[in-house]
Image (spheres, rainbow, N blue to C red):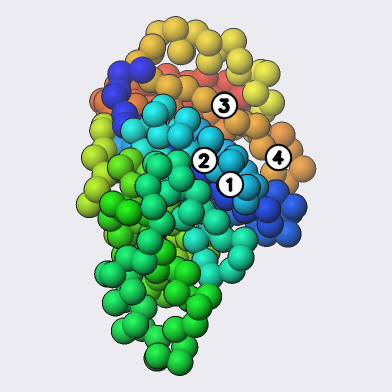
Amino acid sequence: MDYSLMKASLIIIGNEILSGRTQDKNLSYLATWLNEIGIQLSEVRVIRDEEEVIIETVNYLRKTYDYVFTTGGIGPTHDDITSLSIAKAFNVDLEINDKALSILKEYYKDSELTDARMKMTMIPKGAELVENPVSKAPGFKMENVFVMAGIPSIMQGMLEGARKHLKGGDIIKSVSVDVFTPESNVADELTKLQDKYKNIEIGSYPFTKENRFGTSLVLRSKNEQLLEECKLELLKIVDKFKS
C-alpha cells in the first residue's frame, strides 16, 4: 500500500465476553476512532480474567505494536485484576496513586469511598493516569499500553483523555460501492483492478439485503486523487451487473 500507519492492538478482557453474556461494543468504536487519527487497529484478542494470560498477552503485544489498548477489569470487584496484571507485566508495584485517590475523594463522600472503590485507586507505579470524565475512576497508561474500562461510555471518554499521548500516521480515506451480485461475479474484475492500482487497498464484503445477495466493494488509500480514479473504474465494473 502507499501509506504508512502507526499500528495498534486491542485486548478485550473479561469472562463475561467469552461466555456470551455481554456483547463487546468497544471494538468497532475503537477501530473507527483510531483510523480517524491515522492509527490502524491490526490485531484484537479476547481473553479471560486470568493473570498469567493477561501478562503474557500484554507483554507480547506491547513489543509488537506501537500501541496496545485494553478494556475491562479495572473496576472494584474481586475479579477485576487487570491493573495488578499490568503491574506484573511491567515488573512494578501496584500502589495507591495519590492523584487517583484525590479524584475519588472529591467524587465520593467519605462514607461512599469503600474498600471496594479504593481498589480503583491502585495503579501500577510509574503509570500516567488517563482521565475518566464519566465516573471519574481513571484509566492509565504504562509506556505504550493504555488500560481502560470495559463500559463503552466510559471507554470512549477515556479515549479522549488518551488522545494527547497518541501519534498518528497517514489518515486513510475510503470509498464504498454496493452492487447486488455475489462477490464471485466480480472477483476476476477486482483482481485486474488491484493489479493496476497496487497502492490502493481493495476489498469485497458479501451481504444480503431484501432477500438478495450483494457485495460491498471498498477502496482505501491516503491518495484522494488516485482513489477517485480507481473509483471511476470500479463504477464501470459495477455497471455491468446492474439490472
x, y percentage for residue 100? 33, 70
Could you tell me if residue 45 is visible in this image? Answer: yes
> Could you give the CA–CA distance between mark 1 and mark 4, rounded to whole angstroms?
42 Å
- Nearest to N terminus: mark 1 or mark 4: 1
As drawn, 112 above or below 235: below
Q: Nearer the viewer, mark 1 or mark 4?
A: 1
Secondary element at tag 1: helix
- For label 1, the residue is 51
The answer for how far apart the CA atoms under marks 2 and 3 are is 36 Å
Quote the CA–CA distance across marks 4 and 3.
13 Å
Q: Residue at x 68, y 53 (%)?
A: 15
Residue kind at label 3, given as amino acid type: Ser
Q: CA distance from mark 2 to mark 1?
A: 6 Å
State which mark lies toward you, 2 or 3: 2
User: Residue 80 appears in which quarter of the rendering?
Assistant: bottom right
User: Mark 3: few, some, or many residues within 10 Å (few <14, many ≥20)?
Assistant: some
Tell me if label 2 and label 3 are in contact, CB under 8 Å: no
Q: Secondary structure at mark 3?
A: strand
Mark 3 in CB contact with mark 1 (< 8 angstroms): no
- Residue 3: x and y in percent read 30, 23
Between 230 and 66, the one lying in front of the other is 66
| Residue for badge 4 | 208
89, 178: nearer the viewer: 89
Q: How many marks?
A: 4
- Pointer 2 with pointer 1, Cβ within 8 A: yes
Tag 1: Cα neighbours inside 10 Å, few (<14), some, or many (≥20)? some
**At label 2, which amino acid type do we have?**
Ile
What's the amino acid at mark 1? Answer: Glu
Whether residue 44 is visible: no
Residue, disc 3? 204
Vertical arrangement, residue 189 with respect to residue 46, above or below: above
